[in-house]
Amino acid sequence: MRSFEELNLSPELARAIKDLGYESPSPIQVQALPILLAEPTDFIGLAATGTGKTAAFGIPLLEQIEPGKKQVQVLILCPTRELALQVTGQINLLGKYKNVNALSIYGGASYREQINGLRSGSQVVVGTPGRVIDHLERGILDISKVKTIILDEADEMISMGFKDDLETILQAATGESCQTWLFSATMNKDVRRVADNYLFQPKFVQVNRTEMLSTTVEQVFYRTRESDKPEILCKIIEAADNFYGLIFCQTKNLVMDLTQYLSNRGYRVDSLHGDKTQKDRERTVQAFRDRRVSILVCTDVASRGLDVKDITHVINYSLPRELEVYVHRIGRTARSGKTGTAISLVTPSHRDLVARIERHTKTRMEEGIVPTRKEIGIKKVAKMLTPFQAQKNYARAIELLTPEWKNVIAQMKAEEIVGRFLGVMSPEIFENQERGKPLQAHVAADSQARRNRRGKWKQDSRNRR
Ligand code: AMP
């Protein structure tokens, strides 16, 4: 199956898919849709958020709904309110021509609205397990006629302590031939146990991480010389909307030098490398999670197991030689349904790696054009407009102006006053000179280290001989 047309979907769904702009099915959809659209069956799909899994179960569930019947026909369980809302939104978009209503029910929100929603006959309920149980116990939610239960992010729900709630709900779904579809990013023993106990001969599909990345991570490369990397890196960071990212380097010396360089240029940056103690690393990761630090420069080994949400960028300051390492690095962005950008700084000697990565990840890497200082300046100044407009204390500030001030500004146009203020407050935007020393120290040190290594290797091989 390569296209949505091959699935013979109802015209209502085909139209909604077109409206959403989905041109071709994502890898999980390619595998899951033909199964879930065919016979009723229990099902396990191993796929993370961001792979298109919502449509993978949303399309078939919408096809089986009887819109005329105003009763709960499908129950989708999600670990968080955010995911529940996201899934509800997608089901409603996909089901808009089918006249199907999805309703979210989650903790922390008013019961009244949810009760009204349930009474109005929503056919699809998307809820967090705790609140679903509340409504079941109050007799407001009836899932006895439910035909399909979907466990979305089953591993997350279990790790958040919802295992018993899940079991209670699965036991309450007593409908004849009720099918259960379980989606999970990972298959650990707890997920396996739930599947073994509640799913009957489930069909199974899985998409691997490389396939997932191709749909969620935008991959861009910049051609550069080694000595231009620091400057290009800064431009990329400054041109991004709200950079929150990881920068990978091959050696810990480079990590340390680059961190120092970025810190000198005023970025909130920290590093993870092998010379740091465990405690130090934990402190750094916490600072990054709390966004006190927005850039983390790291080696592959030191960042192993790092799982931080909402990372916008992963930068390969040095490209790894192993493709799996590349995939592992860029998989740190685009988590939890978000998209992300992976940027690689590519020197002429690494050009061949781009084609290899493209083949491996089955995606094209776009070549990026380094933004000019002017473009970055326009962007930065544009960002100041909202806080400028929201400024409430300006009347009190005016009271502080001395006659000299008033005299000086009386001669100026508004643009000149704004321009001068921007220059005083953010001089770096308008500087012609590049700030900070170039990374010459590390470049020199790095090539010295290479020479030393080469010398040592020769020495070693002489010794071996
Ligand atoms: P999900 O994994 O369900 O959270 O989906 C991640 C994002 O991919 C959502 O924004 C979907 O709208 C989008 N999406 C799902 N299927 C497709 C598709 N076949 N083509 C393009 N985008 C898609």
Image: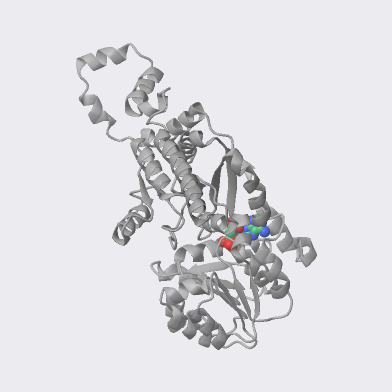
Residue 179 spot, x, y in % from top left: 63, 82
Tell me which residue sits at (78%, 61%) in the image: 5
Residue 283 spot, x, y in % from top left: 30, 57
Q: Is residue 412 left or right of residue 322?
A: left
Q: Is residue 376 above or below residue 339?
A: above
Tell me which residue sits at (55%, 63%) in the image: 49
Task: Please tell me which residue lies in front, 377 or 286.
Answer: 286
Q: Is residue 175 above or below residue 3?
A: below
Residue 62 spot, x, y in % from top left: 66, 69
Task: Please tell me which residue lies in front, 258 or 94.
Answer: 258
Task: Please tell me which residue lies in front, 13 or 455.
Answer: 455
Q: How many marks?
A: 0
On the image, which quarter does residue 100 sit in? bottom right
Query: Can I make out residue 121 in this image?
Result: no
Snapshot colouring: one colour
Q: Is residue 173 left or right of residue 264?
A: right
On the image, which quarter does residue 29 sit in? bottom right
Tell me which residue sits at (32%, 61%) in the image: 278
Task: Please tell me which residue lies in front, 296 or 47.
Answer: 296
Q: Is residue 298 left or right of residue 176?
A: left
Residue 465 spot, x, y in % from top left: 53, 55
Classify the position of the N terminus by image quarter: bottom right
Q: Quadrant of ligand 1?
A: bottom right
Query: Can I make out residue 442 in this image?
Result: yes
